[in-house]
Image: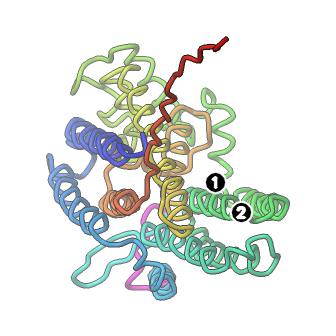
């Protein structure tokens, strides 16, 4: 499986991207205040850009990133700070996740920051591999590399992305050799801080209460998850047919972004939703296989981090849409509408392919042939 990991990974990703374009065509034409099929045309353009970036990442030697991890992380943090600058940061739905720059247009810096954080953590532990169990260089310094940009994302009120980045970063720290009790204590502190921020924000707390009582809040904070449940129920095993879904007609807000998984369930049924989950299982398995066979320690940690960066938001999105987790507002990678997320997630896939192209695979050792001899006893 090691030698074919990149092929299987690319097939799974291509399936998800194709699924996203098909479902976006089916759902986005009903989005409020949007010209018919305009979102699909934009997503096709972003798909092309993402494929070009992924191709460039796959062609490039990933080890170059190890030399430039400091400026990469600084640029990512600077872009996150720009979200708070009036005139550059864009407020939408009470959140400031976007910036608008000349020539580049509007995008989410947190998507760049996710990749930058993984690169910086992998480069740090590759440099200080022998000190990964030390408190200062094995926990405090990499904790700052992870914590500073994550907090910048968190205070944009993008708590879902911050939680996903934190989980991916913790995966890198754990694999690198950071002592698990330090991680456990910091995770407990982070959870306590997150709980306080949620309880002090009326909107976030309403989402938690809605998650606990969808039936009682189906006309308020629990509307999206309640309507998503109805969509899954209507779809059944094989779905009502592509384009025949009813929840997208204004009943389910953001059906083409955060809740597109429920539209897959309604129109294509349980078979398609399980197929989507299976594709992410393949991405996880192939990503970890690539990381395991990487040529150096930097590559191994980079592969683990990139895989977690792709899969953790997918788990959280599917958990939210199926009402297993509270509503966090995360897109489904490769499938939901959104240019920034698509481009940089495809870039992560390109880096995984770069790792695979430069991996060393163990050759199969031929089994020794033992010649049989007949021994005769001479009398």
Q: Which residue is mark 1?
A: 204
- Judged left or right of residue 229, residue 187 is right
Residue drawn at 29 percent across, 41 percent down: 11
Q: Tell me the crowding category of disc 2: few under 14, some 14 to 19, or many 20 or more residues within 10 angstroms, Cα based.
A: some
Assess whether mark 2 and mark 1 are in contact (beta carbons under 8 angstroms): yes
Mark 1, other Cα within 10 Å: few <14 / some 14–19 / many ≥20:
many
- Is disc 1 placed on a helix, strand or loop? helix
Identify whether 224 is placed above or below 76: above
Q: Is residue 83 above or below residue 372?
A: below
* Quarter where residue 354 is shown: bottom left
What range of the chain is rendered magenta? 81-93
Q: Give residue 171's position: percent from left, percent from top.
A: 64, 57
- Which residue occupies the foreground of this view, 348 or 74? 348
Going from N to C along the chain, the mark reached first, 1 or 2, is: 2
Instruction: Compare residues 217 and 195 and report the one nearer the observer.
Output: 195
* Residue 328 to residue 116: above or below: above
Colour mode of the rendering: rainbow
Where is mark 2, residue-wise?
A: 197
- Residue 321: say if magenta: no
Residue 21 vs residue 239: left or right?
left
């Amino acid at each position: 499986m090691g030698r074919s990991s990149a092929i299987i990974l690319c097939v799974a990703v291509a399936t998800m991207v194709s699924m996203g374009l098909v479902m976006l065509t089916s759902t986005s034409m009903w989005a409020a205040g949007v010209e018919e099929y305009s979102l699909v045309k934009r997503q096709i353009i972003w798909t092309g850009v993402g494929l070009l970036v992924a191709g460039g990442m796959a062609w490039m030697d990933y080890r170059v990133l190890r030399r430039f991890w400091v400026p990469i992380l600084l640029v990512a943090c600077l872009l996150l700070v720009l979200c708070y600058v009036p005139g550059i940061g864009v407020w939408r739905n009470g959140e400031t996740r976007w910036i608008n720059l000349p020539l580049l247009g509007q995008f989410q810096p947190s998507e760049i920051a996710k990749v930058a954080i993984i690169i910086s953590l992998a480069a740090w532990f590759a440099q200080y591999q022998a000190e990964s169990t030390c408190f200062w260089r094995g926990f405090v310094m990499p904790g700052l590399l992870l914590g500073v940009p994550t907090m910048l994302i968190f205070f944009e009120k993008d708590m879902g992305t911050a939680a996903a980045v934190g989980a991916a970063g913790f995966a890198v720290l754990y694999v690198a050799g950071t002592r698990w009790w330090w991680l456990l204590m910091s995770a407990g502190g982070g959870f306590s801080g997150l709980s306080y921020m949620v309880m002090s924000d009326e909107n976030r707390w309403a989402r938690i209460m809605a998650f606990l009582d969808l039936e009682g809040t189906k006309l308020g904070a629990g509307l999206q998850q309640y309507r998503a449940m109805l969509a899954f129920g209507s779809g059944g095993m094989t779905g009502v047919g592509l384009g025949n879904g009813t929840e997208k007609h204004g009943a389910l807000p953001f059906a083409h972004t955060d809740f597109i998984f429920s539209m897959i369930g309604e129109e294509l049924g349980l078979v398609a939703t399980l197929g989507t989950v299976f594709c992410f299982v393949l991405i996880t398995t192939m990503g970890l296989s690539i990381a395991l066979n990487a040529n150096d320690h930097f590559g191994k940690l980079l592969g683990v981090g990139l895989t977690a960066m792709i899969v953790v938001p997918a788990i959280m999105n599917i958990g939210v849409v199926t009402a297993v987790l509270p509503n966090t507002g995360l897109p489904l990678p490769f499938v939901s509408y959104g240019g920034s997320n698509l481009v940089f997630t495809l870039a992560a896939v390109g880096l995984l392919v770069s790792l695979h192209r430069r991996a060393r695979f163990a050759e199969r050792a031929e089994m020794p042939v033992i010649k049989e001899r007949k021994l005769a006893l001479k009398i």
